[in-house]
Image (cartoon, helix red, strand yellow):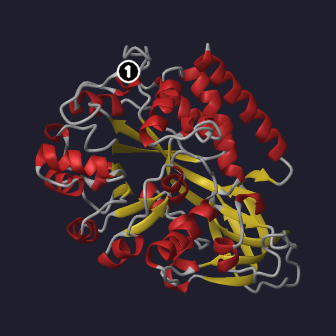
Amino acid sequence: MSARWLLTRAWVGEGAAARVADDVLVEVSDGRFNRVEPDWSARAGEVAPERVEGLTVPGLANAHSHAFHRALRGRTQRERGTFWTWREQMYALAATLDPDSYRTLATAFFREMVATGVTGVGEFHYLHHRPDGGRYDDPNAMGHALVDAAAEAGLRITLLDTLYLSSGFGRAPEGAQVRYDDGDADAWLARWDEVRPADHLVLGRAYHSVRAVPREQLRAHDPADGPLHVHLSEQVAENEACLAATGLTPTGLLAEAGALTEATSLVHATHLTDADVALLGGARTWACFCPTTERDLGDGIGPSRALHDAGARLNLGSDSHAVVDLFEEMRAVELDERLATQARGHWSAAELLAAGTAHASLGVPDAGRIAVGARADLVTLDTASVRTAGTGADEATAVFAATGADVVRVVTDGRVVHERGQEAEVGRRLADAIAAVWEKVDA
């Protein structure tokens, strides 16, 4: 498949050399850019390309997602509660899903994600087995439902198959958790090895958390095995329980196990000691912040800039999907730092845009930039909306003005997967899929 487009304004290049340019000609072949030429003007005999109006940025990377949580939006906010009461509602939902209903829900939700500019998702997957803990004939039926849903929605997926063995330190899985449990790490890895390959799939691993994986079941991670993601220090209670049980912080426990590498993303990383920050920075891990979820659940504000300055790298996720808008996640990192420190200017727009396009943390290092040889992922923003008009049509527009509602066109691996005007149909499918799920929960 080949394509040729003239981007009227685009964020091109990579790293410190990335910049906004006008009239950028891009040519795509086999899903990759083979020509990126700013300030293009037609030469004699050259066919005019299709014009793409607006500000175009690389496709966004949603590094942390639990697809089924989308059905909780607007429901867990109706009454007062804590993280733990939210979790009970989440467990009730998780207990009802089967491969067919999960595929239907995930397809509708992934289409929403694509419509907001996401071209690659890290799906933190632990709904492995039947609700009673029994195995499906295909032991990866639930994971394959997610992979199939991503393909239908036009989304690359990094399936972060998750080890989950306990409900807390020294406690067996209970309730809905029994369907998460593989028994031990060896059985989990054996099942992981049976996930069928797909062109749009990267297969990664995850430890749910140190409270859900006993110390003796943690394994050293080889980056050659792909990404490893872990929920880390999301709650003060988790840190206290880990210290009481092991004498180490969750970060220290992962370091002891050899699980901190450049391929590791630590999700939330909210309540860290100075020693924890130094460990994560020294290992060059990713720190995956999910600000809209962290504020929805009342988790707290993590030390994003301190982690960066120590050597860690920032990526972003929407986690529980109270909001699905990576532009909001980007600016929230800076705005939350301002609240925590009562000072401005912690992160530049360029740094936050890089965090929002960090596909390398999902095992896809050749995405996230508009450059020759990279995967052809493009997200075009309306620069004349009530949010973006007059904001400069540059990286600051994307990070500090735009929302997912300003996305007018999305290209994944050279294929147009969303255009403005499809939102109503996406919404209808979401409404139908979520209603069907809650009928089962309420039955």
**Residue 401 left/right relative to 127:** right
Near mark 1 (Cα within 10 A), the count class, few <14, some 14-19 or many ≥20, is some
Q: Position of residue 73 (x, y in %)?
A: 63, 40
Residue occupied by mark 1: 175
Of the pair 254 and 332, the residue shown nearer to us: 332
Q: Considering depth in this image, is 408 or 255 the residue closer to the camera?
A: 255
The residue located at (84%, 69%) in the rendering is: 385
Horizontal side of 412 relative to 300 (left or right) equals right
Could you tell me the amino acid type at mark 1? Gly
Q: Is residue 62 above or below residue 431?
A: below
> Which one is in front, 204 or 317?
317
Q: Is residue 146 visible?
A: yes
Horizontal and vertical percent for residue 129? 41, 21
Residue 374 visible: no
Name the residue located 49 percent from the left edge and 83 percent from the top edge. 343
With respect to residue 352, does 67 lie above or below?
A: above
Residue 401's place in the image compared with 413, above or below, is below
Where is residue 364? Give x, y as percent: 47, 57
Where residue 335 sits, quadrant-wise, is bottom right
